Image (cartoon, rainbow, N blue to C red):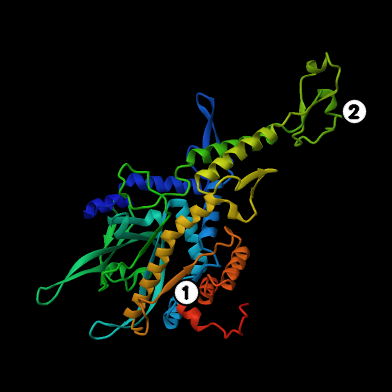
Amino acid sequence: MNIFTYFKKKGIDTLDSSFYSKIAMWDSWYRSDVKKFHWYRVYRSASNYTRCHRKSLGMAKKLCEDISDLLLNEKVKITIKDPVTEAFVKGVLEEANFTVQGNEYQERKAACGTVAYVPYLTNMIIAKDGSVVSADVKLDYVVARNIFPTAWERSRITECIFVFEKTYKRKKYAQFQHHKREKMIGEDGADLGFQYVIENSVVLASDGAGKELAPAEWDEIPCFAGLAERVETGSAKPQFVIDRLNIVNNVDEDDTNPMGVSIFANSVDVLAKLDLEYDSYSNEFTLGRKRIFVAPEMLTDADGSQVFDPDDSVFYQLPEDFFKESHEAMHEVNMSLRVQEHEQAINNDLNLLSFKCGFGTQCYRFEKGAIVTATQVISENSDMYRNVKKHEIILNQALIDLIRAIIRLGKTAGMTALVEDTDITIDFDDSIIVDKQTERQEDRQDVAIGVMGLPEYRAKWYGETEEAAAARLPEQSPGVLF
């Protein structure tokens, strides 16, 4: 099914399909499976080509793994001031396996530039007046290739279509979930502002635009049973969160493209050169292995039995005339290996790749045929520190927006005790980037000389708000701080 043919048929405007070709290209580098590069043909004759596979260092995935671990790992603390609200939100995130999936989708975000989080209500019980008596809050994760913005302002996506692919009885279906703003008009004709509505449609994947199913048809498919054709949220705030890397999108000539770009979007040439060098390095050992050329009379004994294993790739028979001048029975050939030259070239490009992707230099090195990551604390690496803190700006807001969306849905589901505007603090783990022990000791000294208060210290190191920290301070003996 061609999604853009479906959009054209429905009169829906989104980004040009060429940008999604870029996303597919980034994804192929992430998987080390790029057409016409990792798989290529070698000319043998006019009618004969040999299909070959180029070995890869897999550095695109390594970059994505490392930035995701720096941005969102198990040490990141989410603190919500209201305890009831905090317990509810953390329950939803735990049910959604956010500790694992959150890190995974940071990696996918780094690979293709953008991901989305879409909370929703399920298992709803509806009262006669149409209000929701109870429901469960769930969370969907969406990758870049299935995110189609339809409206945006100042790089912020305000309306969007998300595509969820499903398979049932060997048939492929696509659910199109369109989040868009609509005006609300009161019974007296008064303008009540905007609200978000969610429109769903289900399409049977086939050639062209596919076959759109009627609600009665998709209700018979278990994975779409109970799916509403239209949902009015009653909220002026979106029920989705877009998360992207804090890198300017320079792929399109149109500078307004609101989607993110891959962390290696501007380093593809370096990735290609690295894989060429690594493939050559590997072939060096294949082509340079020891070979022994043997005269024909040495291959059999007096009884005519073979002396050497015919499957042994070390020994090769050469014509008897080859050995006439040298009078040798065997001739050993040891090819020289250009190991040092290859390793130097790979290390040079690893430094270039690391620098271009915001990790500074010397982050990776190639030793003994494998990639080694620097293990020292990276407090000295100002490039990496600034890069990570820059990406945290967008991630911090995305997490807060997600939490507030979950709270709104909880209130819609009848949990009136939840507080939407409660204070939310995201404490990112910087222990890999900065020396936490040294920083903590310095803060203790600041408290001792009176330039930092105990509530401020506790709030920083225990992931609390200053109000909560002040209330939880233990009684101190006169003159004793720690």
Q: Quick check: 55 left or right of 291?
A: left
The answer to whether residue 88 is above or below residue 290 is below
Of the residues shown, which amino acid type is indicated by label 2?
Ala
State the separation of the CA atoms marked 2 and 1. 85 Å
Whether residues under marks 2 and 1 lie with C-beta atoms below 8 angstroms apart, the answer is: no
How many numbered circles does the render carry? 2
Q: How crowded is mark 2: few (under 14 residues within 10 Å), some or many (20 or more)?
A: few
Name the residue at 61% across, 45% down.
Answer: 362
Residue on which disc 2 sits: 302
Name the residue at 50% across, 47% down.
Answer: 357
Name the one closer to the observer, 466 or 302: 466
Name the one closer to the observer, 152 or 438: 438
The answer to whether residue 288 is above or below residue 469 is above
Name the one closer to the observer, 266 or 452: 452
Spot occupied by residue 4 in the image (x, y as percentages of width and height): 29, 50
Residue on which disc 1 sits: 79
> Looking at the image, can residue 307 be seen?
yes
Mark number displayed over residue 341 = none
Of the residues shown, which amino acid type is indicated by label 1?
Thr
Q: Earlier in the sequence, mark 2 or mark 1?
A: 1
Secondary structure, mark 1, is strand
Spot occupied by residue 73 in the image (x, y as percentages of width and height): 54, 64
